[in-house]
Image (cartoon, rainbow, N blue to C red):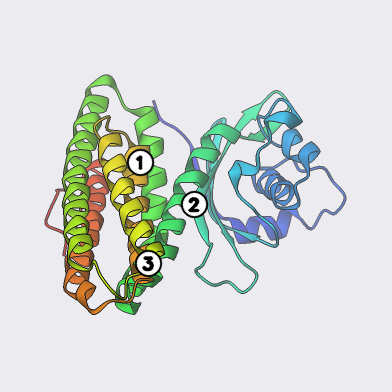
Amino acid sequence: MNRHMIQIISVLLLALMLSACGKKAVTVPEVTKAFWDAVITNDNSDAVEYSTLESDEDFDRFGRDWLNMIPSWGQIVIDGDDARVNTQVSTPDGTGAGMLFFVTYLNKTENGWKVDYERTGKGVRVSGSVVDFVDRITTLGEDIQRQFEETSENVAIEMTTIVEQLDQMTEQYQDQADKAIESTADSMRKLLDEFANSLEKAIEEIQGPGITETNQTDMKESVDRLQSSSNELKNPSLDAIANSGQQVIIVTEKLADISDEKLKKYSEQWEEILDKFEDEMARLIAHFNGEEAAAVE
């Protein structure tokens, strides 16, 4: 069945549509802008009016603080009664910190175009997790930070694509996806166990003068975090995989605050574990994109 696909650059279309001031938003770009303006200004009424939400009580702003954030738009694709708009929301200074990349999905209803709140929310939360993950990289050194900042946009969009594709897969492909997720979760679980064991050895070695009670507590809590995440991965899911990556960053952030010469020899091990996490995520993304799972540099 052939579908008529319309692809346009939203900046041009927005400029055209928004020139008619005072009119209610009716087109895809107008509804998209009106909806995100409502999210950012916490306007419950407009958020419900321009989305698939049924009541103000269901409006949770996707669980994020949007104060002073600025939305912008990329490519728009309209396919019959469905549409999607590549969306970027950033801070006023346009820096990478807190910048989100995702897709706004819309459905054409009896009352016109509406933002699909639930489906869009999946992408927002995935993008938020990736950005939070990247932001914590700063404690691991400038080189690692730069690498993640340069790829954060692509990772966020690719992860959004994974969520979309999972919704559309047939039973056969879903089975393949489940196996890929299980394989990645198993690899990450082993990495978490490796990190926990290494940290336990470090705790034993640095006992003594110079290590505060707070340092000891942080390190023991970090071991607990890693072991808890490892157990969570025994029930593989994308949420568990994302959470495991975040826990690794939280732990390394805590460790960065501990100043002890004896820890230096462990830092290289921990950075290698983080690199392996990135490799596993890249392989999972490649799988969902139908790419050959080549070795990640």
Compare marks 1 and 3 and give the one earlier in the sequence.
3
Q: CA distance from mark 1 to mark 3?
A: 23 Å
Q: Amino acid at mark 1?
A: Ile
Q: Amino acid at mark 3?
A: Ile
Are circles 1 and 2 on residues that touch, CB within 8 Å?
A: no
Q: Which mark is residue 128?
A: 2
Give the residue drawn at x 66%, y 54%: 66
Q: Which residue is mark 3?
A: 137
Q: Which residue is mark 1?
A: 162
Give the foreground label among 2 and 3.
3
Q: Amino acid at mark 2?
A: Gly
Secondary structure found at label 1: helix
Q: Is residue 138 above or below residue 17?
A: below
The residue positioned farthest toward the top in the image shown: 171
Give the foreground label among 1 and 2.
2
Give the residue drawn at x 18%, y 50%: 191
- Residue 19, by quadrant, is bottom right
Image quadrant holding the C terminus, namely: bottom left
Secondary structure found at label 3: helix
Compare marks 1 and 2 and give the one earlier in the sequence.
2
Q: CA distance from mark 2 to mark 3?
A: 15 Å
- Residue 209, by quadrant, is bottom left
Residue 100 coordinates in the image, percent (x, y): 52, 57
Give the residue drawn at x 62%, y 74%: 93
Q: Is residue 32 left or right of residue 279?
A: right
Name the one closer to the observer, 114 or 150: 150
